[in-house]
Amino acid sequence: MTMSGSHNRLLDADLWSGTLITLHQADDATIVTWRGEEIKLALALTDPFIRVMDETTFVLVDFTRDDLRPNAWVVRADGSIETSFHAGTFIASIVVDESGIWVGYGDEGIFGEGISTEALVCFSRSGYVLFRYNHDTRKAPIIVDCEHLVTTESGVWFFPSLERELTQIDRNGRIVAYRTPKIICDSEAMTIVDEIAYFVRGGELYRWTFGRREKPIRCGRVTGDLRGCTGGFLQINGTDVTFLRV
């Protein structure tokens, strides 16, 4: 599955229920393309993320270096803004699931100030804080950055942490961590499919059955800017986005 457009720059994309949504920066507007429609938004974004929430709404979250102005917007398919709120600074990753909007922060946010120091936070669609990793967990792996964040039916997953552990917060709030082999540490992208982890490092795709005493297996080469999503990876190149199923 590939989508391309004539807009100046493709900022981000998401795959939901087999359909791509894309976020573009044009000369005079921010444009979302979804299900054959273009939605123009009067928002000044620097390094944003887009994720679908349900069949009628999506969320935009911007990276943001400072201040407390809104940098998260829940937007309806007609372009109207349902709500906006401040989601922290130095945002590194976003996923959405039945629990809410999960926001992971980079090291500058985690070792900075405000809500970002929680490392990983779950917000409601109205911006209410539902979960704060550092505050609400005990003896959990330390997160020094949260760049790789994915969600599955079993829970939310992130990697890496200070202890190089692939970590899951399951639907009951229980934390399970798996020590990660060195060969896939410092990976550029990650996803979880059917309880198997896939990592991209140096253009190599690795398949790792966590929970077993098995080594990661090389299973292909990939190129471009990749991000883990449901069922595989999104590959973003210039104005094009491709879904790579694993």
Image (tube, rainbow, N blue to C red):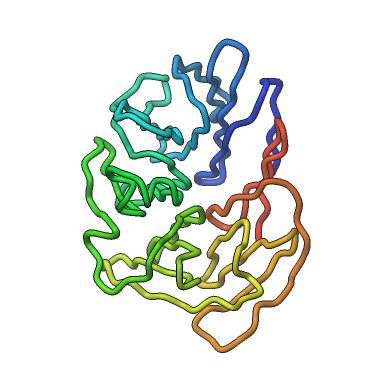
Q: Report which quarter residue 56 is drawn in.
A: top left
Q: Is 199 drawn above or below residue 121 in the view shown? A: below
Looking at the image, can residue 30 be seen?
yes
| Residue in front for this viewpoint, 79 or 61 | 61
Looking at the image, can residue 58 be seen?
no
Q: Quadrant of the C terminus?
A: bottom right
At 38% from the left and 63% from the top, the residue drawn is 155
Q: Quadrant of the N terminus?
A: top right
Q: Is 182 drawn above or below residue 31 in the view shown? A: below
At 54% from the left and 14% from the top, the residue drawn is 29
At 62% from the left and 53% from the top, the residue drawn is 233
Q: Report which quarter residue 152 is drawn in.
A: bottom left
Q: Report which quarter residue 62 is drawn in.
A: top left
Task: Please state if 71 lies on the left or on the right of 203 as rendered.
Answer: left
Q: Residue furthest front?
A: 112
Location of residue 7 in the rendering, given as x and y in whole percent from the top left corner: 67, 20
Q: Is 69 drawn above or below residue 108 in the view shown? A: above
Q: Residue furthest bottom?
A: 213
Location of residue 21 in the rendering, given as x and y in whole percent from the top left corner: 55, 35
Location of residue 94 in the rendering, given as x and y in whole percent from the top left corner: 44, 46
